[in-house]
Amino acid sequence: MGTEQIRRWESGALAHAVTDPFGQGPLPWLRGSETYFDDTGRIVPWYVGPDALEGPGVPRPRRDSAGSSPRTADDVDQQIKGFASPAAVAPGEALDFHVTVNPPQQWGLDIYRIGHYAGDGAAKITNSPRLSGIVQPAPLTADRTVSCHHWWQSWRLNVPSFWSTGAYVAVLTTADGHRSHVPFTVRDDHPADLLLVLPELTWQAYNLFPEDGRTGASLYHAWDRRGRLLGEEDAAVTISFDRPYAGAGLPLHVGHAYDFIRWAERYGYDVAYAAARDLHAGRVDPSRYRGLVFPGHDEYWSVPMRDAAERARDIGTSLVFLSANTMYWQVELAPSASGAPDRLLTCRKRRGPGRSALWRDQGRPEQQLLGIQYQGHVPTPHPLIVRNAGHWLWEATGAGEGDEIPGLVAGEADRYFPRVALPEHTHRVLLAHSPYEDRTGARRHQETSLHRAPSGALVFASGTFAWSPALDRPGHTDPRIQRATANLLDRICKRD
């Protein structure tokens, strides 16, 4: 299958963004532009202008005949692709980059931290020296599992002790102007008001690398011998973290987290960072934080992750879920073939004997933690309808009872299921009740939930994909949602 035929699947945009209008990733909004592609069909970079492509770390890319530069690497030719191991480190620890370059040539790497920097969504922190690139061995495949754990180390980053905790992106650039990305996290166990937990399990679940029409597989798709994209019943059961992300190298849905980060750092919240596997491995001490924030689509949870979230709630640490379809599938994590921990993710979904891997089929419905749970897809955005407008969450937002917030119910939606047990609570309120039609034309509704646990912890679930984009994404921001979120986080930070 040729590059032109496969281009439409880059970053899973067509495969998944059809039902998630906010799943395109961070490219358009980390700087002010909302342009996804230039007039040649190439992605316009968010992180650098043409005049900044020189320097000791990155060779200056040549412009093509149209004067365009840089160009996004693809999964067919794999001009430059890479991944980091591990994907989350503490200051003082090392991060290894494994990169393939085709054809072999010099390349360089710039490190950016996601945040709010005088209106920009990222700031350059450092860069690598010029490096000699090689074509790494082809990915290994076994029963639809694709792994690059056998790739040679290309460069090691020793994270300085003074680096800030945060979400980072490594930008890989070849001498001839091809570009790709590698996201990673710098975590820190110092106390903070809020801990942001990045949903890397869900990011990897949707990763179809390599999107080459032959090899790649995610928990949703795989290819047949004729280059046709197959559905979930033929997809992978086990996937590896030891591989690049498809297309431009940024995960599908990563923009949800970046939206929250930009907004939270703009308004000065005291935020620490961790990845989902930190929660799984017990590296998160919830007593150090007043709230844990899950900022984006966070569908895949292991048992240790859920147990950790429930322990956090039970000691008085609040939980904030700013998306929908949270904690839907139960997964397991295992070491890679090289012995590195938590590098393989398995979710058998509805396959095999016994119960499916849905949390609700395992006897622990997600509503018992969230207060609501997954209802279904929202084919086209609908307004969120405000309920209980006198509640403090809506204070000073200007929202009145029954007011409509356009486009805020989008992608996927949650609601309260009356026949499913609720978590223990001292107070509970539904803050939105929003009708919409599903793909079949059936009438459904979305709800937003807030309850207080006996420990005093607040548990908030937005029940829609569009909440985080409403905080700081150009074209989607809404001051009512910004203020409501501030009302919530301010209460949590004050332990009110």
Image (tube, helix red, strand yellow):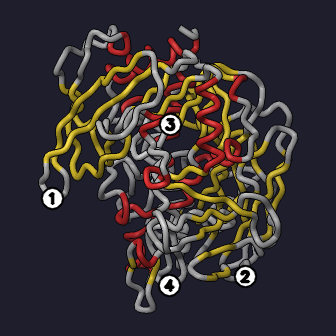
> Type of residue at label 3?
Pro
How far apart, in angstroms, are the residues tagged by discs 1 and 2? 46 Å
Q: Which of marks 4 and 1 is nearer the N terminus?
A: 4
> Type of residue at label 2?
Pro
Q: Is mark 1 on a helix, strand or loop?
A: loop
Q: Residue furthest bottom?
A: 225
Q: Which of marks 1 and 2 is nearer the N terminus?
A: 2
Q: Earlier in the sequence, mark 3 or mark 4?
A: 4
Q: Which of marks 3 and 4 is in front?
A: 3
* 155 lies left or right of 493: right
> Type of residue at label 1?
Thr
Mark 4 highlights which residue? 214
Mark 1 highlights which residue? 440
**Viewer-proximal residue among 139 and 153:** 139
Q: Earlier in the sequence, mark 2 or mark 4?
A: 2
Q: Earlier in the sequence, mark 3 or mark 1?
A: 3
Mark 2 highlights which residue? 137
* 41 lies left or right of 215: left
* Marks 3 and 4 in Cβ contact (< 8 Å): no
Which image quarter: residue 122? top right
Q: Is mark 2 on a helix, strand or loop?
A: loop
User: Label 3 crowding class (10 Å Cα cut-off): few <14, some 14-19, many 20+?
Assistant: many
Q: Nearer the viewer, mark 1 or mark 2?
A: 1
Residue 272 in the image, given as x and y percentages of width and height: 67, 29
Rendered image: mark on residue 295: 3
Which image quarter: residue 332? bottom right
Residue 74 in the image, given as x and y percentages of width and height: 52, 71
Q: Is residue 447 above or below residue 276?
A: above
Residue at x 59%, y 61% (from the top left corner): 180
